[in-house]
Image: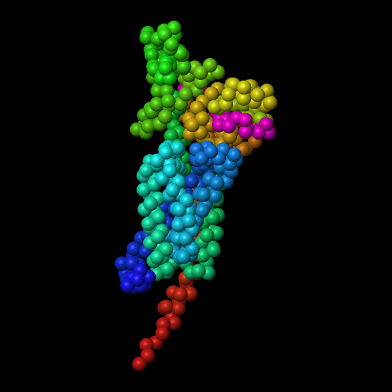
Amino acid sequence: MTIKAIINAVKGEKWCLVLTMLMRLTVGGVFIFSGFTKAIDPWGGSYKITDYLSALGLTEWTDTALFIAVALAVIEFVLGVVIAVGAYRRSGPIVALLLMLVMTPLTLWLAVTDAVPDCGCFGDALHLSNWATFGKNVLLLLGIIYLLLFNKSLRGVYGPAVHWAVMALSFVFVMAVAYYGYFTQPLIDYRPYPVGTRLVSSTIEDSEEGEDDFIFVYSKDGEQHEFTIDSLPDEEDGWEYVTRYHARRPHGKVIVQNGNSQPGIAILDEVGNDITIDVLSDSRRTVLLLFPDLPQVGVVNSFALNELNDAALVADADVIGLTPATSEEIEQWKDVSMASYPIYNMDDSELKMIARGNPAVVYLEDGVIKWKRTLDSLDDVEQPIELSEMGKDYDADSILTSLMLAYLTAMLILVVINRTHLLIKRLFFKKKPTN
């Protein structure tokens, strides 16, 4: 008995139909979740694609990182919906197979080389090890092969005439999610610093601090070690000063806040000293201007930034710029933009975790994040300004809920329109039994 004959023999079996439905939901669900979590945060996706391109030596393609990130999110989400509802029963699994024939070897390479520590398959929503990711892709590949063999044995939720509409509605929904995530902020913030997070400790008063409150970091023979003020090493023995951080705020480590762990941030001055406690006072209102890629910030943004700076100072709030850029790049920006606000250094990865955008704006009260936005999404600044209300018009939860309700309602209406005639036919036009 041939394989084809065996497949034809089991296609009509009840267990086969049930298993086919489970495979559709499982494979489709993974693709939907993967595409959705990528679409939520296009900035994060572009950063991850840049890591991949750099690891592969394709740095000349980094300008396409955002396009690739959004395109991958859209393809995965739409493909997942198509598979889950049984649309395009033959071509859907074929496209999924082609995609996995690229992704599976890629994740195997990552697992072996660890060239990119986190694959970014599910954005920041779920982190898997590279070997776990490879295992997940192997299982997906097996599920897709099963669907290639048996998917046509089970009808889909929608008829062939409206399969294009299923794809169109899914495309519009996922693109809307990506639009808000890129031009304002992600509709779901999976990173360590969501709104309501305290960036600095409320128990530390500047007036009570002294040198004995700091830990000093020195390096020797390529290794870094920490010392208190009473045990500083002798530089004549080969020790080189690196930086310092406040003893009561972990630097570059994990701190626990309200039961949740998060990385500790570090703001550095021009010589590398940790000045986080000095510039982020708990008792002040602070506007952070984040420049993850300062050389790419257009001069056209300087007017809006300076307007925001002037309005914030009138409102008695501090304004601080943060960037991983070099001192030369910072000075060049100040000359071109005529910026009067101070700009300090922060690690690239820490900066991108706080907020998305280049530039992005983050507002703090008593060291707590109240809102964050991309600069372009803020309305024109007018004095006097109420900083606490300025960025609160972006209600991510309400927007996401509205988008999901609209999408699911449209999909439900589509199935009703598409399948009502079959229901009517079965109820009122049943064939009379013949004698």
Q: How many marks?
A: 0
Q: Nearer the viewer, residue 28 or 208?
A: 28
| Residue 268 pos. (x, y %) | 51, 20
Where on the picture, by quarter, is residue 212?
top left
Question: Which residue is painted at 65% across and 24% down in the image?
Answer: 332
Q: Does residue 423 sit above or below 222 in this rendering?
A: below
Q: Which quadrant of the rendered structure holds the N terminus?
A: bottom left
Q: Does residue 249 sit above or below 94 in this rendering?
A: above
Question: Which residue is painted at 50% across and 47% down in the image?
Answer: 39
Where on the picture, by quarter, is residue 220?
top left
Q: Is residue 410 magenta?
A: no
Question: Which residue is painted at 68% across and 33% down in the image?
Answer: 300
| Residue 309 pos. (x, y %) | 62, 26
Q: Does residue 230 sit above or below 350 in this rendering?
A: above
Question: Which residue is painted at 36% across and 48% down in the image?
Answer: 135
Q: Nearer the viewer, residue 98 or 25?
A: 98
Q: Which quadrant of the rendered structure holds the C terminus?
A: bottom left
Residue at the limit of the structure toward the left, as seen here: 15
Residue at the limit of the structure toward the front, as seen here: 1
Q: Is residue 230 visible?
A: yes
Stretch of the chain drawn in magenta: 281-301
Q: Is residue 202 visible?
A: no
Q: Is residue 282 magenta?
A: yes
Residue at the limit of the structure toward the bottom, as seen here: 435
